[in-house]
Amino acid sequence: MKEKIMIVDDSLELRNVLRLYLENAGYKVVEATNGLEALEYLKSNDIDLMILDIMMPKMDGFELLKHLESQNKKRNFPIIFLSARTQIHDKIRGLTLGADDYIEKPYDPSEVIARVMVVLRRINKQKEEEKQIIVGNLTWDVSNRQIYLNNELLELRAKEYQLLTLFMKYPGRVYTKQEIYEYLWEDSYLNDDNTIMVHISNLRDKIEDNPKKPNKIITIRGLGYMLKKEENKNDR
């Protein structure tokens, strides 16, 4: 499944250049011209990384990052500042606010791609190295490739395990049927909804209190499926 990068910058020329390089590197790209547009998009969509300018109208990059950090839910994507502000205090402020990297303009697009790859690789490695991921009464023992429901080991088929771990990485994120299919089978999606629905149904049978009225794996009509965010109820 391709990782999605959001470019937040008021320069159309810059966005076009970065889009070209990012798409050539195999990433999906979405754009926003200021912080408010980015926030509006993030209300109903997820991303894997944000490339963020500082000086923009309506809401600048610092304001956007402060807003994201102040939200109750944990931000689940890294941010790279890409800015013409080269003073050391600007870099320190950006990194202190929570940015993962800071690149000065002018820049070489190839360097930006390399930095994106490094940050994503580090984030993905951190996730894989986590000993446990807990969502409600589900506990994923990452190193042993086992998932527990109320401390009881779940017997899962390979695709069920892949699907549930995909959901558990980002609870609350909506995955389209195309994203699920391409992730599980590493092949192009051919509108094979029945196959996906069967796996979702089988998984619900194993983790839901009432599979006919699921409250964990939620169907988002017209979009796809997500694992509902829940407070951690137990520790194994």
Image (cartoon, grey):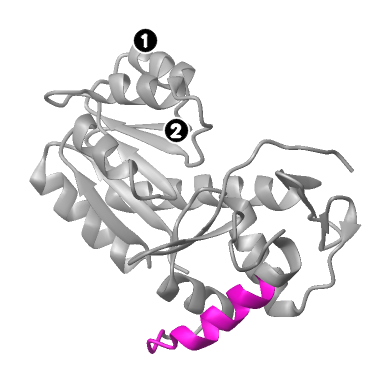
Please state, as top left, top right, bottom left or bottom right, where the C terminus lies in the image. Answer: top right
Q: Which residue is mark 1?
A: 89
Position of residue 9 in the picture relative to residue 193 (left or right): left
User: Residue 72: where, in percent of width, then height?
Assistant: 50, 25
Dot 1 amino acid type = His
Please tell me whether residue 24 belongs to the stretch shown in magenta.
Answer: no
Mark closest to the chain's N terminus, 1 or 2: 1
Helix, strand or loop at disc 2?
strand
Residue at x-position 70% and y-position 53%:
128
User: Residue 40: where, in percent of width, then height?
Assistant: 25, 39
Does the magenta stretch mainly form a helix, a strand or a loop?
Answer: helix
- Report the Cα–Cα distance between label 1 and label 2: 14 Å
Q: Name the one closer to the observer, 90 or 40.
A: 40
**Relative vertical location of residue 179 with respect to residue 62 in this rendering, above or below:** below
Dot 2 amino acid type = Asp
Helix, strand or loop at disc 1?
helix
User: Residue 17: where, in percent of width, then height?
Assistant: 18, 54
Q: Name the one closer to the observer, 32 or 115.
A: 32
Residue at x-position 42% and y-position 85%:
188
Within-10-Å neighbours for mark 2: few <14, some 14–19, many 20+: some
Residue at x-position 22% and y-position 61%:
20
Q: Which residue is mark 2?
A: 101
Report which quarter residue 149 is drawn in.
Answer: bottom right
Residue 52 has which mark? none
Q: Name the one closer to the observer, 45 or 92.
A: 45
Q: Name the one closer to the observer, 142 or 100.
A: 142
Report which quarter residue 224 is drawn in.
Answer: bottom left
Magenta-highlighted residues: 189-203
Residue 130 visible in image: no
Report which quarter residue 174 is drawn in.
Answer: bottom left
Position of residue 207 in the picture relative to residue 103 (left or right): right
